[in-house]
Amino acid sequence: MKDLTTKNHQKVVLVGDGAVGSSYAYSMINQGLAEEFVIVDVIKDRTEGDALDLEDAQVFTAPKKVYSGDYSDCGDADVVVITAGAPQKPGETRLDLVNKNLKILSSIVKPVVDSGFDGIFVVAANPVDILTYATWKFSGFPKEKVIGSGTSLDTSRLRVALAKKFNVDPRNVDAYIMGEHGDSEFAAYDEATIGTKPLKALAKEQGITDDDLAKIEDDTRNKAYEIINKKGATFYGVATCLMRITKAILRDENAILPIGAALDGEYGLNDIFIGTPAIINGSGLAGVIEVPLSDREKDLMAKSAATLKQVTKDGLA
Ligand code: 6V0
């Protein structure tokens, strides 16, 4: 295992230089993270153009080596982030998309592993929980070294919406969206707090009803559709979540973040990657924080997991 705490040269490879990937690259450069940042995509002109464009930011950020590369560059990388994937086409089923993106994913993971890569995979391409699981299977890596973006974006959306409703800073909202990154996800309100106070008690004091909270949960679930309707895709939010996960790895933070984690008996689940709070450090997944869910939420988690397992089974069959 690499000791990231003493390493003074960190390297990240991004695979998939589309809307999400290029926004992630921009976020990483702005945060001054990683001394070496490599961009890989099937469209070489795009990666070369982006590398040239991003290097101009070096005058105002920490100097970085940013370049267009290929899979051989992964050999000594600390993190490989996968945002490559085909978008869903009209008339295409979810399973069609799964099959298409699994093919793309296997064409990426194999050469990354063949390069000698021994770092952490971070996966964001959709359907992210299934592609994270497949990255683990295709790579043969220990499950701690494969992290999905899971419900990180959904949790950000929930916190932003709750912050507006309760009129507080979103960074002080400790609430999580859990389960699948998708329609079966849910807000774990029963354990959520704002400034250490149970969210539900605070809601009562402020006249915020269960219906109001249910609407926030629903709007969170549907926010992607709203953004896609207005501008065609969502990318800044997820790109920033990916930057945050990468930072927790590179800085060996032991940060508790909502991610897509491999479960090992937590919530009564195994052999699955699903959205939950977890501890992230230089070794990847350092532990899952098993939220003490209420019975209603346990049920929602089990249903969400069952949905994911079915699609994983059909997709990887
Ligand atoms: P995009 O803008 O179409 O970019 C995809 C990129 O992948 C393109 O540049 C392609 O050239 C590239 N690509 C395709 N095949 C390969 C391959 N075999 N090897 C290398 N590169 C390849 O899509 P966008 O950036 O908007 O989305 C990327 C993925 O992120 C999609 O699967 C989205 O569904 C997913 N998102 C995940 C989110 C999350 O919360 N996890 C949120 C938003 C989008």
Image: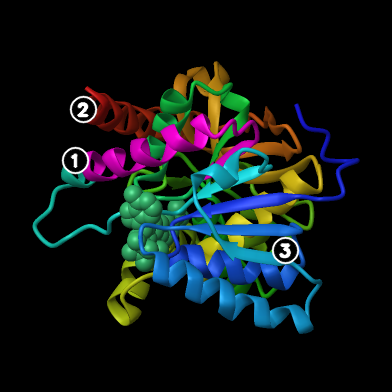
Ligand 1 rendered quadrant: bottom left
Quadrant into which the C terminus falls: top left
| Residue type, numbered disc 3 | Arg
* Residue 170 in the image: above or below residue 131: below
The one nearer the camera, 286 or 189, is 286
Q: At 59% from the left edge and 57% from the top edge, which residue is drawn? A: 38
Q: Is residue 222 visible?
A: no
Q: CA distance from mark 1 to mark 3?
A: 36 Å
Nearer the N terminus, badge 2 or badge 1? 1
Q: Which residues are magenta?
A: 98-122
Q: At 42% from the left edge and 24% from the top edge, which residue is drawn? A: 137
Q: At 82% from the left edge and 40% from the top edge, which residue is drawn? A: 4
Give yes or no for residue 120 being in the magenta stretch. Answer: yes
Quadrant into which the N terminus falls: top right
Residue at which label 3 appears: 171
Lateral position of residue 80 relative to residue 215, left or right: right
